[in-house]
Image (cartoon, rainbow, N blue to C red):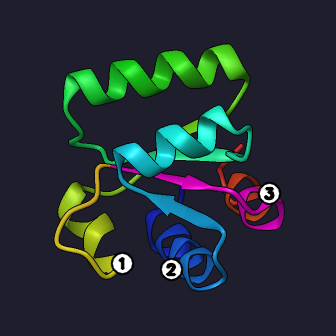
């Protein structure tokens, strides 16, 4: 993921109500089938990465790694964020489209 562009898209998704932030909220959104793209901080803990990578693989949800927890948190108005879930299809498409090929 292009870090700078996608942090901006994540902020827009949050403002539009198309983003879940934090372990509990993301788990609930995955269980409801709402998640279109999962974003993990590059320095998220092993257990967090393992759990969400496994769930998302099973559900067919793309997983991408982004900024550090601090950077991701700042972009989303929090101190730190390890995991966020994009629930808006258009936001997820745009972020996936920005990847280098």
* Closer to us: 17 or 36: 17
Q: To which residue does mark 3 refer?
A: 93
Secondary structure state at the residue bearing disc 2: helix
**53 shown above or below 68:** above
Sequence order check, earlier mark of 1 and 3: 1
Q: To which residue does mark 2 refer?
A: 11
- Mark 1 and 2 residues: CB-CB less than 8 Å, in contact? yes
For residue 100, side relative to residue 3 (left or right): right
* Closer to us: 99 or 30: 30
Magenta span: 83-92
Please report the residue visible at 57 percent of the width from the left and 85 percent of the height from the top: 15
* Closer to us: 17 or 82: 17
Please report the residue visible at 25 percent of the width from the left and 75 percent of the height from the top: 78
Q: CA distance from mark 1 to mark 3?
A: 19 Å
Q: To which residue does mark 1 refer?
A: 75
Residue 37: say if magenta.
Answer: no
Instruction: Specify whether residue 62 is in view.
Output: no
Say which quarter of the image contains residue 87: bottom right
**98 shown above or below 41:** below
Q: Residues within 10 Å of mark 3 (few under 14, many from 20)?
A: few
Q: What is the x, y in percent for residue 50? A: 35, 18
Sequence order check, earlier mark of 3 and 2: 2
């Amino acid at each position: 993921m292009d870090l700078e562009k996608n942090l901006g898209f994540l902020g827009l998704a949050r403002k539009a109500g198309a983003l879940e932030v934090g372990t509990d909220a993301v788990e609930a959104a995955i269980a409801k089938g709402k998640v279109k793209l999962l974003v993990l901080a590059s320095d998220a803990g092993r257990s967090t990465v393992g759990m969400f990578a496994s769930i998302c693989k099973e559900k067919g949800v793309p997983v991408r790694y982004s900024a550090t927890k601090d950077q991701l948190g700042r972009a989303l108005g929090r101190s730190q964020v390890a995991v966020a879930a994009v629930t808006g299809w258009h936001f997820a498409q745009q972020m996936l489209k920005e990847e280098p090929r």
